[in-house]
Image (tube, helix red, strand yellow):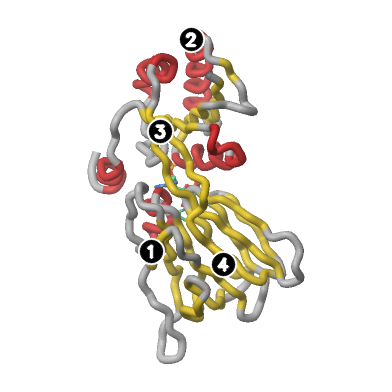
């Protein structure tokens, strides 16, 4: 089996990364940064986002494992004290694969040309480059509303505990193939109206945003921020691809939610 380890880059994560690499090689596993079967991310949820984007072109062949060196994470659920146990589990035990849904973002341009396709593990956000974002929102090809406000956030179930939660979105269990659209400070008064509630879409529905005036947007995909010009539409749906996690021990999602937001 081939493996790679990605580190957050701080001294604690780097030391642990070195330890994991050495131990796994002692068990005759091969270190291969280009085509790993297993990617171990050491740091936090943010580190796993980086690892996901690095290996997003081979998701069907890669399983991820997250080790946290700070606070407990949603993607990083092993603690440094458990490293020996984790190494033996990776080297000796057949692991279970847990799959989580991803978000597909398709950007199309006004003057034709090649569309841009992205996959997000947490979410995508759309904001205007300058001033209020004004966009028509279509649901499943039908006009739904004209949005005016700071922006829109479209998240995956596993990303629902991140930015989406700060926007008042619901927490969705990652076994549900869905995406969630949450508003950022919409303008609502006698003239302008938006739904105001987060919307949860099933896998066979799309949400499409179309510019009303200015066609330039700031699009974020997880930690990445990208400027898109001359945009005709931005379409969101549940991706065909999934992220795969190697699971060696049960750690139910609702326990992780409780640990992260309610108590230790
Ligand atoms: P960052 O600003 O350095 O960290 C964002 C925080 O979000 C970190 O504490 C991170 O945990 C946590 N996080 C990431 N994914 C999560 C998840 N699925 N559930 C719960 N918490 C999660 O940025 P970053 O590390 O590059 O991560 C980018 C993410 O930041 C974006 O995908 C977005 O979700 C989030 N974000 C949140 C807000 C907000 O809540 N208002 C605003 C902007 C962006 P770790 O410390 O374990 O890495």
Q: Residue farthest to the bottom?
A: 190
Secondary structure of the residue carrying tag 1 is strand
Disc 4 and disc 1 in contact, CB within 8 angstroms: no
* Classed neighbour count for the residue bearing mark 2: other residues with Cα under 10 Å, few (<14), some (14–19), many (≥20): few
Q: Name the residue tied to disc 2.
A: 27
- On the question of residue 74 being in view, the answer is yes
Secondary structure of the residue carrying tag 2 is loop
What's the mark number on residue 57? Answer: none
* Classed neighbour count for the residue bearing mark 4: other residues with Cα under 10 Å, few (<14), some (14–19), many (≥20): many
Q: Name the residue tied to disc 4.
A: 127
Q: Is mark 1 within 8 Å of ligand 1?
A: no
Q: Nearer the viewer, mark 4 or mark 3?
A: 3
Up the image or down, 222 lies above or below 189; here it is above
Mark sitting earlier along the chain (4/1): 4
Q: Which of marks 2 and 3 is in front?
A: 3
- Which of 46/34 is in front? 34
Q: Which residue is drawn at 39% across and 77% down?
A: 195
Q: Which of marks 3 and 1 is in front?
A: 3
Q: Which residue is drawn at 49% across and 28% down?
A: 40
What is the CA distance from the residue labelled 4 to the residue labelled 2?
48 Å
Mark sitting earlier along the chain (4/3): 3
Q: Name the residue tied to disc 1.
A: 200
Splitting the image into 4 quarters, where does residue 255 fall?
A: top left
Up the image or down, 133 lies above or below 263; here it is below
Q: Name the residue tied to disc 3.
A: 97
Secondary structure of the residue carrying tag 4 is strand
* Classed neighbour count for the residue bearing mark 1: other residues with Cα under 10 Å, few (<14), some (14–19), many (≥20): some
């Amino acid at each position: 089996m081939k493996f790679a380890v990605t580190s957050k880059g701080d001294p604690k994560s780097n030391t642990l990364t070195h330890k994991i690499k050495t131990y796994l090689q002692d068990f005759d596993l091969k270190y291969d940064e280009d085509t790993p079967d297993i990617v171990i991310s050491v740091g936090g949820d943010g580190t796993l986002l980086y690892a996901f984007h690095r290996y997003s072109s081979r998701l069907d062949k890669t399983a991820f494992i997250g080790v946290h060196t700070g606070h407990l994470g949603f993607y990083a659920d092993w603690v440094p004290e458990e490293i020996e146990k984790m190494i033996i589990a990776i080297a000796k035990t057949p692991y279970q694969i847990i799959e989580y849904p991803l978000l597909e973002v398709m950007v199309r341009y006004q003057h034709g040309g090649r569309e841009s396709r992205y996959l997000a593990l947490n979410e995508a956000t759309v904001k205007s480059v300058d001033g209020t974002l004004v966009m028509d929102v279509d649901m499943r090809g039908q006009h739904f509303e004209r949005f005016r406000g700071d922006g829109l956030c479209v998240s995956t179930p596993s990303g629902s505990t991140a930015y989406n939660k700060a926007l008042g979105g619901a927490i969705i269990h990652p076994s549900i193939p869905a995406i969630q659209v949450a508003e950022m400070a919409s303008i609502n008064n006698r003239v302008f109206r938006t739904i105001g509630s987060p919307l949860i879409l099933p896998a066979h529905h799309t949400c499409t945003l179309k510019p009303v005036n200015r066609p330039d947007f700031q699009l974020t995909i997880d930690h990445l921020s990208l400027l898109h010009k001359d945009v005709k539409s931005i379409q969101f749906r549940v991706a065909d691809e999934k992220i795969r996690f190697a699971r060696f021990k049960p750690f139910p999602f609702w326990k992780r939610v409780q640990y992260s937001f309610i108590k230790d």
